[in-house]
Amino acid sequence: MDIFREWYHDRHRYAREWKEKTGGKVIGYFCTYVPEELIYAAGMLPVRILGSHEPQDVTEPHIFGMYCPFCRDCLAQGLKGRYDYLDGIMIAQSCLHIRQAFTSWDIHVPREFSYFLPMPHHVQSPRAYPFLREELAAFKKALEDWTGKTITDQDLDRGIEIMNTNRRLMRQVYELRKREEVPVTGLEAMYMVLASQMTDKVEHNKGLGEILAELPNRKLERRTGDRLMILGSENDDTAFMNMVETVLGATFVIEDHCTGSRYFWNEVEWQEDRLAAIAARYVDRPPCPTKDWPKRRRLEWVLEMAREWGVQGAIVVQQKFCDPHEADIVAFQKALQERGIPTLFLEFDVTVPLGPFRIRVEAFLEMLRQEDLF
Amino acid sequence: MVVNQADKPKEYWRWTEYNWFDPSRDWRKAKIISGGVDVGSVSTQAVIMLDGELYAYSNMRTGSDSPDSAIKAMKWAMENTGMKMEDLTYTVGTGYGRVNVPFANKTVTEIACHARGANYMYGSTVRTVLDMGGQDCKAIRCDEKGKVVSFLMNDKCAAGTGRGMEVFANLLAVSIEEVGEMSLQVEKEPPPVSSTCVVFAKTEATGLLRAGWPKERVLAAYCSAMAHRVVSLLERNGVERDFAITGGIAKNIGVVSRIEKELNLKALKPRYDTQIAGALGAALFAKALVEKGKG
């Protein structure tokens, strides 16, 4: 599993080397509603733009104070030139905060290609399918105009195949996390998904294949302990995950994040009209709360996962000021608690104060375990 | 050259550090001598219990060195008892410096310890505990055994905590132990200071003094702001009878009475020093761990 951690930490070197090796173009994207199938079909490398969890002072003039720390951290990477190898940037509509990061990046560090894909919000409407299908056609044309090369059905099939394989293999890893003694930690699983968002998935799939051959027999040198779920906004806070799993001895057995299951859960199901098939996949995927109304479909999905993965406690996290997630928190905590799953709410920022978070998580775990003390 | 040196300023924030033990009991006859040490950000307490009954304790200021504070506090609690460190059967460390208690056999968070301690101090009817500590503040709900059911801690800053009150005691040159009483000497309750940040609140208070407000009124405005702040924390976590307050601020009648008024609920009257709740809970856990063979 170490390769995923290395790819995640060396994301920029990886992308630069990929460019040198292939001569291909790299597109940075801001939200997981971006249809990577089309980018792979065009022979390019999609990489998700994520922050670096360092304090910074470059975004203040460009982004509102009450926008989330994640969008701020992402924009900082652009303004600091860390993604200077990107040939293009794009976003699919999700929330206003991340869109401002994209727009500001586009103004201050423009690339050769820039694209805003109006992913529909009302994914619960049947009209979302044809709407997105047409938008995907427009996006495909924009890519073709940029490269001067036509994207054929065969290319699309290749893109779909790469993405679907990746999803299928990661699901297999997640299945193993249902075991009483899990063979992967939550942190390792997080690195795996994060790495898939920033590497060539052909290579990532190869890595997954090798790991899956070993994983069913892998024994961790630690007990699984308390089975936790973590859910909420974007989360690549590896320092937090590591603290909970190494210092406090619990294990994250499942999560609901766009840096995790929400990103890869469902596959593109074959249709003659490839764009319609891809559109259906994104309309039907586990939703981001920006798109999860009027019904709360994500809640049903989270409860189902909690049940299947034998979750004993849930940590609900939110990037500070992430209103869409905040609007869900009360309902989610209530529903989980009604099913006997205690919850702990934490607000994440660019850097996480490990001391104060440790005491909260430790007290939460004591609440789950406290029998010995009485 | 002679320089006129100002007198060393009086430390109004300083609260009484002391130790206590029950001379009527013989610790040598006890089966389990359990210890609890709560190394907080501001104060440290050590508690010694004989078979689950309070025997001795100390309450002092935390120094810059947590392990040193823990040892000092425990030795001070043992003063005049003839007990030595090695006589302790089992010790649990808690508080923000809990991992730095060198002689502790185990650590438990102060959240669990305060709930357990409050259960001992106030009885099994306590369901809501508000711990107002030196640099943080916790709303805890617990069951009849003192097990934590849910909790919330202040997130953003240290406003509404003991440290903030110390700053105000110094600013107004009023002993910290008199702040609460003095804040009640107002005919009409002033509006609370609006800043929650201790530093900004201090600036605001300076402005009020300049505008001619008497000290009593400024203290009333600050105590009231502190009460507002913790009540919102309590309400987020839910409030159920009986209600008890632990920690240093529980001794401040100005804050306590305002919390009671806002909640429309009386806090139980303390029978022990409210600052020892955490260490007391730790000592009780130490005993339980020994009995369960986990010690």
Image (tube, coloured by chain):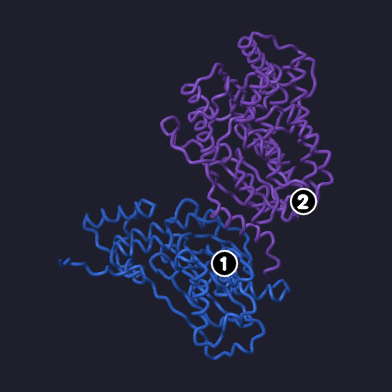
Q: Is residue A20 above or below residue A366?
A: above
Report how many numbered discs are placed on residues in the image. Answer: 2
Q: Secondary structure at mark 1?
A: strand
The three-letter code of the residue at mark 2 reads Leu
Is label 1 or label 2 in front? 2
Q: Is residue A374 left or right of residue B168?
A: right
The quadrant in which the N terminus of chain B is found is: bottom left
Seen in the picture, residue A163 relative to B217 is either above or below; the reply is above
Colour of chain B, in one word, is blue
- Split into 4 quadrants, where in the image is the C terminus of chain B? bottom right
Q: Residue at x 72, y 71 (%)?
A: B294
Question: Real-space Cα distance between discs 1 and 2?
Answer: 30 Å
User: On what subunit does the disc labeled 1 rest?
Assistant: B
Circle 2 is placed at which residue position?
A: A220
Q: Are marks 1 and 2 on the same chain?
A: no
Percent x, y of residue B126: 57, 69
The chain holding disc 2 is A
Residue lying at the far left of the rendered structure: B1
Q: Quadrant of residue B152?
A: bottom right
Q: On screen, A1 above or below A132?
A: below
Chain A as rendered: colour: purple
Comparing B113 with B256, the one in front is B113
For mark 1, does the 10 Å Cα neighbourhood hold few (<14), some (14 to 19), or many (20 or more) residues? many
Q: Residues within 10 Å of mark 2 (few under 14, many from 20)?
A: few
Give the numbered dot on residue A326. Answer: none
Given residues A249 and A5, the one toward you in this image is A5
Q: Amino acid at mark 1?
A: Thr
Residue behind mark 1? B94
Q: Residue at x 63, y 27 (%)?
A: A15
